[in-house]
Image (cartoon, rainbow, N blue to C red):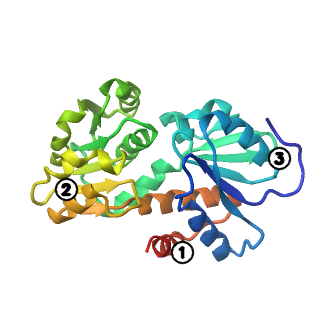
Amino acid sequence: MTAAAGPARRGAAVLGSPISHSLSPVLHRAAYDALGLADWTYRAIECTSDRLHDTLRGLDTERLAGVSLTMPLKRTVVPMLATVDTVAATVGAANTVIFRDDGWHGANTDVLGMVAALRPHLSGTQAGSRAAILGAGATAASAIAAAANLGFSGVAVFARRPSAARELEGLAANLDLGVDVLGWEHLATAADHPLVIATTPADSTQALATAIAATPGLLFDVIYSPWPTPLAAAWQAGGGRVVGGLELLTEQAALQVHLMTGLPASVDVMREAGYAALH
């Protein structure tokens, strides 16, 4: 699994399926340009779970520095890793792999990316409050960890299959968060929470979008394209505040650039490149 010592590692990639829509190459290349890393490249590679190990092995042999992962690869990759950081171990998902000569290292930048994207929009008085999490996948797990980091005392997880949220119940308990798991038929009640983090496809939240009352709280929708999502548009129409998925993508990508290059990336430069690409 490990590569022999050789030339310095350069460049990275994002893996997933489908992957052609990914904005990650735009963000990472903008960071490389700003850092003067003219010999670094970043490309998107179509990769399914059954091809992940072989693809990683090939990219390791190419002397890439690392890769970014989209779903469902964030959980699939964990057993393939020699080491993982504390956050990845806690949530059971890694969105970043760093190739090292002594093994593959996994990291999770989604949690800290969410925290960085949300903190400026919160009052800092979350103690005693519960955040609503829409979905039960790896991104929902990161959202629960972010809610704990931000000071919430509990979460309400809305899942299309409540049985799929059992792992999330355990995660919340480990983070000393109270947790309620509710079926999708209760989705309209999510808007009663001061923070709603939507981690599901845009077309899955129509029941909530049509039930928005005036002046809801803060919505964080992890989708960035197409934007706004129907939920985000309804939320804004009701007078609520919205943080879009590009903020998460940019914050977590900047952390990845730092892990892969050893250099601090400019979030502002990356965000500007992302907005330009979307518009």
The one of 247 and 209 positioned closer to us in this rendering: 209
Q: Residues within 10 Å of mark 1 (few under 14, many from 20)?
A: some
Residue 104 locus on image (x, y percent) = 72, 40
Q: Residues within 10 Å of mark 3 (few under 14, many from 20)?
A: some
Marks 3 and 1, the one that precedes in the sequence: 3
Residue plotted at (30% across, 42% down): 133
Q: Is residue 220 left or right of residue 101?
A: left
Q: Is residue 86 visible?
A: no
Measure the C-alpha gap from mark 2 to mark 1. 29 Å
Q: Which residue is mark 1?
A: 269
Q: Nearer the viewer, mark 2 or mark 3?
A: 3
Tell me, yes or no, whether the two marked residues, 3 and 1, touch with CB atoms within 8 Å: no
> SS class of the residue under badge 1?
helix
Q: Which residue is mark 2?
A: 217
- Looking at the rendered image, the quarter that the C terminus falls into is bottom left
Disc ID at residue 139: none
Please name the amino acid that badge 2 sits on.
Answer: Gly
Tell me, yes or no, whether the two marked residues, 2 and 3, touch with CB atoms within 8 Å: no
Residue 236 locus on image (x, y percent) = 21, 64
Disc ID at residue 61: 3
Please name the amino acid that badge 3 sits on.
Answer: Thr
- Looking at the rendered image, the quarter that the N terminus falls into is top right
Marks 2 and 1, the one that precedes in the sequence: 2
> SS class of the residue under badge 2?
loop
Measure the C-alpha gap from mark 3 to mark 1. 31 Å
Please name the amino acid that badge 1 sits on.
Answer: Val
The one of 194 and 56 positioned closer to us in this rendering: 56
